[in-house]
Image (cartoon, rainbow, N blue to C red):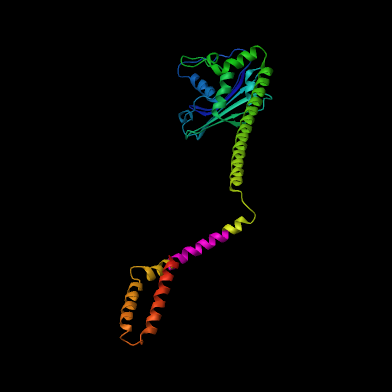
Amino acid sequence: MLVALAIRDIVLIDRLSIDFASGMTVLTGETGAGKSILLDALSLALGGRGDSSLVRHGAEQGDVTAVFDVAAGHPVRGLLRDSAIDTEGDLILRRVQAADGRSRAFVNDQPVSVTLLRQIGRVLVEIHGQHDDRAMVEPSAHRALLDAFGGLEGDATAVVGAYHAWRAAEIEVAALGTRIDTARKEADYLRSAVDELRGLAPKPDEEDALAGRRQHLMRAEKVAGDVAEAFETVAGSASPVPTLAGLVRRLERKGKEAGGLLDGAIAALDRALTALEDAARSLE
């Protein structure tokens, strides 16, 4: 039951406070007397659409507070508990609409979203008008109304708790499944690595031996260039061997005419020729 409505700086209203007695209350007046302003203010407190045009001209913000006396078994109490809002005493809904368009909502002096305020308002009040929805056709309220009618709020709360526990268990099972898959992949990798090591059959100190061989090969690669250059010099296209061989043959033919004077030189050149040929074979 709505027991009080306080309005400040809304449309044409500067300050207004109304206390409602039990039973039926009727607001009457001529067209333009301001009845719709009261309904607009109440709608704002119930989570209705806010607009800067609702703020009285010259004011920085408008403020509407609606106070309800809610029965102990009313469905709205379950909604308040689910939202961690204090349910003791009267239910106080407050909406502050700023002239710059910003809007704030409070339930029992606790800041809430306008969406939650609207949900609470739909459970509390039905505003019947030409273009307004009725709470009875609001699908989100049907289950709560049915539970309240059957006195099953406690069971509904237990079901919510069981559902959350089930979802938590389901998430944990999925996480464990992921961990198991990861462990299996790691086990497959380790088995493959062990099989490769067994195939390699490493020996004690083999790593040091391979490192030494690698160093030897690296040095050999550097020496190979010098060897190739030496081979090219001795046996390549610029080799002195053919020229030296021809020279030895000419000197041998001339040796008889020289009376043995060239024998030493011919022998030395012949030895040099033989040494070059041996070197070429070694370098090859």
The number of numbered discs placed on residues in the rendered structure image is 0
Place of residue 72 in the rendered image (x, y in percent of width and height, measured from the top left): 68, 18
The image shows residue 198, relative to residue 81, as above or below, that is: below
- 253 is higher (above) or lower (below) than 167: below
Q: Position of residue 22 (x, y in %)?
A: 64, 15
Residue 211 lies in quadrant? bottom right
- Closer-to-camera residue (180/213): 213
Q: Give yes or no for residue 119 being in the magenta stretch.
A: no
> Residue visible at 40% across and 68% down?
231
Q: Where is residue 284 in the image (x, y as percent from the top left)?
A: 43, 65
Residue found at x 62% / y 32%: 177
State whether residue 256 is above or below residue 58: below
- The residues colored magenta run 211-226
Expressed as whole percent of the image width and height from the top left, the position of residue 215 reads 54, 62
Residue 136 visible in the picture: yes
In the picture, residue 160 is in which quadrant? top right
Residue at x 63% of width, y 18% of height: 75
Magenta stretch: helix, strand or loop mostly: helix
Which image quarter holds the N terminus?
top right
- Left/right placement of residue 129 relative to residue 157 reads left
| Observer-nearest of 263 and 101 | 263
**Residue 72 is at least partly visible in this image:** no
